[in-house]
Amino acid sequence: LLKTLGEVAPLSYLNMAVNVSLLVVTLSAAARHPSAPPPPKHEIVGSHLFKFGTAFASFGFAYGVHPVLPSILASMRRPQHYVRMVGASFLSTLLFYVPIMVVCYDVYGDRVLSPVYRTPELQHDASVRVIIGLITAHLLFAYPVVMNPPERALEGALRVDSRRRPLLWRMVVRSLVVFGSGLVSVAMQKPEFFGPFLDLVSSFTSTFTVYILP
């Protein structure tokens, strides 16, 4: 029902609130549940070279918003604030990532897992359910924002706006996109499947859009 990215934009405010809540809950849970003995190990430089590619792809995915930036610019009421907006967005992403990464690695060392709520010391805490709920809410709110530009491009290729009953056509097209996403999520729902699949997709897409194509 939300046709353009401008109509979807209010969901971003909900995402911001979810991210702040997720940051607070995760850090408080790590503070309440220190690492079990023996003391965790910390490495200044990682010795697992193959994990560098995974980390590189993950951070590329975190900042891989470049495909939606033209649509954001086109939907802005004040395009002159575009550079300021991008800088603030990347800085806020950094502020959400770094504290969780630093604190959880400091507390759990090499025993910290990804996602962090799978770390044994956190698994039995009641706040873990809150963390999972917040992550789920974040995904649901972020999905329309991320998918709107490719959906609009697909609708343009199919000339949806020039057909009779364009709203019905748009609902069909976007429902099929959601259905396809659902199939992928069901097929990759196990952690041992989803992580490598996400890294593979990020390596072929986000790495290019973040580091090479610009």
Image (tube, grey):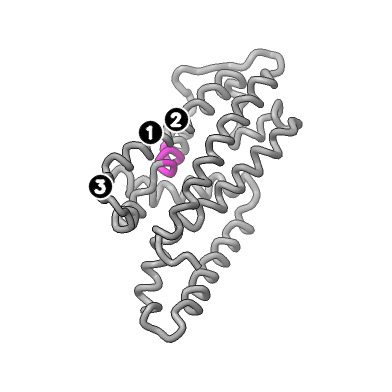
Circle 2: element type: helix
**Residue 184 is drawn in which quadrant?**
bottom right
Circle 1: element type: helix
Picture residue at 50% right of the left edge, 41% below the top: 16
Residues marked 3 and 2 touching at CB (< 8 Å): no
Q: Which of 194/78 is in front?
A: 78
**Residue 92 is drawn in which quadrant?**
top left
Mark pair 3, 1: CA separation: 19 Å
Mark 3 vs mark 1: which is more N-terminal? 1
Please state the extent of the stretch shown in magenta in the rendering. 56-62
Q: Position of residue 1 (x, y in %)?
A: 50, 68
Circle 3: element type: loop
Q: Position of residue 56 (x, y in %)?
A: 41, 37
- What residue is shown with label 1? 91
Tag 1: amino acid: Leu
Farthest bottom residue? 164
- What residue is shown with label 2? 95
Farthest left residue? 80
Comparing labels 3 and 2, the label whose residue is closer to the camera: 2
- What residue is shown with label 3? 214
Picture residue at 43% right of the left edge, 36% below the top: 93
Residue 189 to residue 99: above or below = below
Tag 3: amino acid: Pro
Q: Where is residue 98 in the image (x, y as percent from the top left)?
A: 47, 28
Residues marked 2 and 1 touching at CB (< 8 Å): yes
Is 104 part of what is drawn in magenta? no
